[in-house]
Image (tube, rainbow, N blue to C red):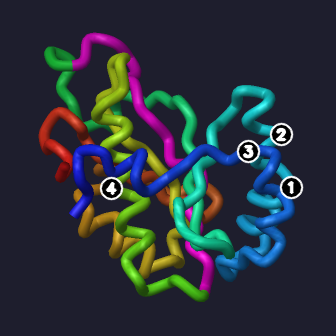
């Protein structure tokens, strides 16, 4: 269960000092590994996203990258009377990785819950948490579904990527 201070207790921002400590990170996906080791800090400097590391002894057990996003009304499931605008605000989970040595330990679920709690507590309007997942990754899809995410009705995967949403207005995250 994620406590009210879960985000601060579980995660810390990625810094330049972490670069050398990430060399052994391996989540089983070379693209994700390369992002964390080479591009995450660059994207932060460009203000495109923010990456957080799990606060645990080395090696790094996992990470989460988030950014601002929008969800089209047609995918939100919201009627026009509830969402007057063509889009709704969202926080996007761009990357979530757990080192293979820690997979199956519940850290992925904790990362999802911490991200959801952060979105819920943002000092600006944020209706959804959104993410994309490889449509062949049934394990990840199962995790996200069990945490309250859903695939928008009528959504067709784009290049094998499946959009999943969590509505912050209908369910309060565990805290």
Residue sitting at 56 percent across and 54 percent down? 64
User: Which mark, by number, is residue 42?
Assistant: 2
Q: How far, Cα to Cα, is label 1 from label 3?
A: 12 Å
Q: Is residue 67 magenta?
A: no
Percent coordinates x, y for residue 32 in the rendering: 71, 65
Residue 15's tag is 3
Q: Nearer the viewer, residue 50 or 54?
A: 54
Single out the mark in the foreground, 3 or 2: 3
Front position among marks 3 and 4: 3
x%, y% of residue 15?
Answer: 73, 44
Tell me: residue 71, above or below residue 140: above
Q: Which residue is mark 4?
A: 113
Chain-order first, disc 1 or disc 4: 1
Counting other residues with Cα less than 10 Å from the Cα at mark 2, is it few (<14), some (14-19), or many (20 or more)? some
The local secondary structure at tag 4 comes to: helix
Q: Quadrant of residue 142?
A: bottom left
Q: Is residue 159 above or below residue 76?
A: below
Disc nearer the start of the sequence (2/4): 2
Instruction: Describe residue 174's horizontal placement relative to residue 128 as left or right.
Output: left
Q: Do residues under tags 1 and 2 come within 8 Å of each other at their CB atoms?
A: yes
Near mark 3 (Cα within 10 A), the count class, few <14, some 14-19 or many ≥20, is few
């Amino acid at each position: 269960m994620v406590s009210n201070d879960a985000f601060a207790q579980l995660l810390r921002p990625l810094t330049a000092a972490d670069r050398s400590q990430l060399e052994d990170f391996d989540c089983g996906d070379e693209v994700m590994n390369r992002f964390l080791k080479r591009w995450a800090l660059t994207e932060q400097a460009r203000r495109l996203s923010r990456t957080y590391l799990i606060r645990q002894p080395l090696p790094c057990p996992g990470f989460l990258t988030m950014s601002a996003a929008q969800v089209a009304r047609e995918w939100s499931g919201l009627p026009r009377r509830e969402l007057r605008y063509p889009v709704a605000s969202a926080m996007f989970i761009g990357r979530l990785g757990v080192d293979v040595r820690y997979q199956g330990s519940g850290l992925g679920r904790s990362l999802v819950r911490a991200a959801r709690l952060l979105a819920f507590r943002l000092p600006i309007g944020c209706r959804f948490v959104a993410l994309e997942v490889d449509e062949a990754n049934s394990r990840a899809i199962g995790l996200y579904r069990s945490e309250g995410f859903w695939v928008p009705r009528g959504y067709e995967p784009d290049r094998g990527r499946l959009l999943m949403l969590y509505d912050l207005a209908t369910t309060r995250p565990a805290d």
